[in-house]
Image (tube, helix red, strand yellow):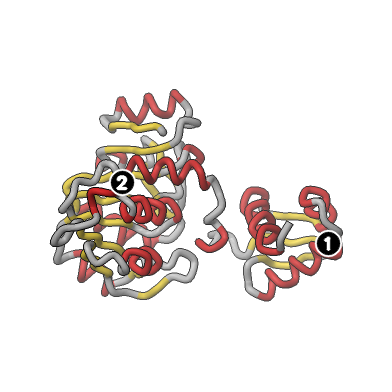
Amino acid sequence: MSRDARWKTLLELLVERGRLDVEEAAGELGVSAATIRRDFDRLAEQQMLVRTRGGAVVHGVSYELPLRYKTARRASEKQRIAKAVAELVAPGEAVGLTGGTTTTEVARALAVRGDLTAGSPALTVVTNALNIANELAVRPQFKIVLTGGVARAQSYELVGPLADTVLGQITVDMAVLGVVAFDVTHGAAAHDETEAAINRLLCERAERVVVAADSSKLGQRAFARICGAEVVDTLVTDTAADAETVRRFEEAGLRVVTV
């Protein structure tokens, strides 16, 4: 296992459990305890975790795994979801994309759609995510609108009053939300309140709202509320979604697409 793969796995285990012992982690990853100790030390230097005697704990009470370490999690599900979301977009529309791994895959799916290779523009994409803008900016047929704001290292998203100002001046046909949690009662949510505020404003500026979320996000709650379920028109998720959870979303008036 490569160092990057080990680090991703260690951080994912920490997010799930809150604490890891050296011996426990070494056994699960099939490497030596000395290797895990070095990994913990390096990750601690980057403030990704806090070293303890014999192990490590998550960094802070409101831990959020940075985007660069989340790209491999549920990758196949996210790609299927992204393709289905991209198919909901009509040529010539204006689409808003929030930050996140699933919405990044949506951007990639839009980039390879054969009917979006030409136009003036073929598509307008509004985003506050630096990585999404960077990937799509090389597509001359796409008009890319990047909000201003202050960049968050965890998600590459721009937040704050500058982003608010831009979003307050535009409208989009469809907003695609990447979320960390989506529940019928508690709505869509993010870890960070500044991201949630930008995402909420994007929803308000959209004709229709689509949540792109793998099944692990459904029925969950998170710190910062983006919007209620009643604001969302369509949920696109994977086929592992619990049938009862899907039924509750449909009863709430959402169209649910499973892929």
Between residue 9 and residue 40, name the one nearer to us.
9
Taking depth in this image into account, of 10 and 20 the one nearest to the observer is: 10
**Residue 200 picture location, percent across and down:** 28, 55
- Asked whether, in this view, residue 137 is left or right of residue 17, the answer is left
**Residue at horizontal 37 percent and vertical 35 percent from the top:** 184
Which residue does the image show at 33% across and 52% down from the upper left? 112
Image coords of residue 41 (percent x, y): 75, 71
Question: Please, what is the three-letter code of the amino acid marked with disc 1?
Answer: Gly
Q: Secondary structure at mark 2?
A: helix
Residue 55 x/y as whole percent: 79, 61
Q: Is residue 155 in view from this perspective?
A: yes
Q: Is residue 255 above or below residue 156?
A: above
User: Could you say which quadrant of the image residue 253 lies in?
Assistant: top left
| Figure disc tally | 2
Q: CA distance from mark 2 to mark 1?
A: 46 Å
Which residue lies under the disc numbered 2?
Answer: 86
Residue 23 placement, left or right of 174:
right
Q: Is residue 96 above or below residue 188?
A: below
Residue drawn at x 32%, y 64% as measured from the top left: 136
Q: Amino acid at mark 2?
A: Ala
Residue count near mark 1 (Cα–Cα under 10 Å), binned few <14, some 14–19, many ≥20: few
Q: Earlier in the sequence, mark 2 or mark 1?
A: 1
| Residue at screen point 38% across, 41% down | 186
Residue 31, quarter of the rendered image: bottom right
Mark 1 secondary-structure assignment? loop
Q: Quadrant of the N terminus?
A: bottom right
Q: Quadrant of the C terminus?
A: top left
What residue sits right under mark 1 in the picture?
A: 54
